[in-house]
Image (cartoon, rainbow, N blue to C red):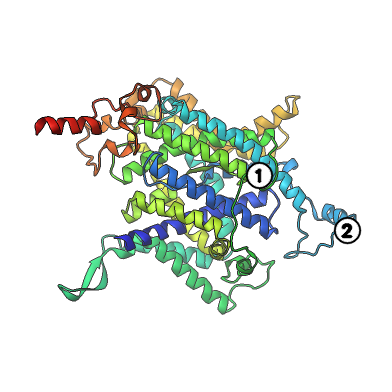
Amino acid sequence: MLLTESLFFLQQALMSISASMSVSLTVAEVVCARDDAEIKSQLLSTAFMMSGISTMLMCTVGVRLPIFQGPSGAYVVPLLVLMAMKEWSCPAREELVALYSNSSINMTEVNGRLPVPKEFILGQIEKLQGSLMVAGAIHILIGLTGFVGVVARYVGPITIVPALLMIVLYVHKVIVNFAETFWGSALSTTACGLILALYLRGKMTPIPFWTRERGFHIFWYPLHQMFSILISVIFGWILSAIFTSTEILSSDPTSIQFYARTDATNDIITTNPWFYFPYPGQFGSSRFDTATFVGAFVATIVSVIDSVCDYRACARVCYVPPPPAHAMNRGIFWEGLMSFFAGMTGAGHATSSYGGNIAAIGITKVASRRVFQLLGFLHILFAILGKLNAAIITIPYSVLGGTMILYFGVFFGIILSQLQFVYMNSTRNLAILGISILVGFMAPNWTDKNPDGIKTGVAELDTVITMLLANGIFVAGALACFLDNTVKGTRESRGLTFQLGGAESNKTDKNIEYEEGIEIYDVPWIPDVVKKSRFTKYCPLLPTYEGLETNANKDEIQKGNA
């Protein structure tokens, strides 16, 4: 059993690593550190550390579901928006030539480009740090005050689906950046995963086995489905190695195919230190930037909605009751706390639940908290052990792109499954969904064509409004939420009956059979003294324990029966 769980957690690790790398490399692009291997390594190490600690806390004392916490995909959107802003643009080659000509530093080109000075890079990271810390503090308050329950009353499937579907508008750009390095190995990796997980679904794999009782025999088990993602990554990696050795992939560092080679980043194994421990302030002091904070604040709201949706999706694929309010409050609280620390350490992004790993549970049918606790521990090792971190970075970009196509595709399918609770024959609901998604695509397109189109006379206000309009997730979500709460409709038709009812709403649903009860969301190691106190009635992070027997009460009952 331990060996099986180890293999499952290795598969989940390969999925989460690709997403962590994509967000970290996006941060590196934003701060102009594309050619600074040291900064990129430190950013990735920091992302791994935050992901590891957050995942272990979430599975143990958070929402207590098998959910991976990693770099929030919601923060990719404001990062991409920042890249398009003038004040966040990287220095042009002419500016760098003039800078180095007036400096005593002798700088050589890297991959045909002049590297950006480290002082400039650190300054950009400092602005990300301060803004993310403020957004993280707001995130903490949302969970600590129980405001998640208020959000759940007004933010239902009709709001969640348009908002999260707009992630496609931005995530596809990140996936293409990885997959386009060589579409052959990227699509082959995706095809391998699809064949194993879908086309061969229900089939059994013959596994040679030996036991003392039966001797040598064939054990039939759906191994190919359980480890579809792991097998597809290995397949893509081997395929890339063949393309590299046969020189099908270009060895020119300036070629787009270079990072699809298996030897493209081998030098990082030798240059990376053996040990590195990310710490707060490692990139310098924190600074506040209005434009960055607006993007981080919007990402925080989207992240909260995304996480609430992920909690329910995870509960659904694990066949357990939907998480109650206290479990969701704890989950959001820990996410906010780790997002605050992510800002302090300069990660450049917050931590949030990952739908891709939830999709993997749906594909493999394996849900275990222990697997994700091991996964969190593994990420901490990646962060501290520099050589191990470097070995993971050598995974070809095209293979990472192929796995991202697979699990993000399944994730978007899970998002659409939220519509099963909405009455889709209602013109009201169809109109809100359609208009919200359409406007969500239109607003960012308009801001791209008219970056200076907003002119209120106040520069900072112009920046804030532009940032909001450029964020399709915010536009679609805000419009859908407004229309859903102002246009007359019943809770049942809006899909809120299931959402607000929690576990109680499912007691009357005879079609759902749960493998565990609502008690899985109780926090472990809570003393009976605390359970009996009034504190639990006012703490939104704990259940009220009303009607539950404490350990002391059980002992008294047993003595009385004796």
Task: From the image, state whether disc 2 or disc 1 is nearer to you.
Answer: 1
Marking on residue 104 = 2
Choose top left, top right, bottom left or bottom right for residue 551. top left
Q: Residue at x 34, y 24 (%)?
A: 491
Say if 227 sits above or below 519 in the image.
below
Q: Is residue 92 left or right of residue 181?
A: right
Q: Residue at x 61, y 41 (%)?
A: 344
Residue at the outermost right position: 102
Say if 175 sits above or below 314 in the image.
below
Q: Position of residue 37 (x, y in %)?
A: 67, 60
Q: Secondary structure at mark 2?
A: loop
Quadrant where the C terminus is found in the figure:
top left
Q: Is residue 556 visible?
A: yes
Q: Position of residue 458 (x, y in %)?
A: 75, 25
Report the amino acid beneath label 1.
Gly
Q: Position of residue 475 (x, y in %)?
A: 55, 33
Q: Which residue is mark 1?
A: 281
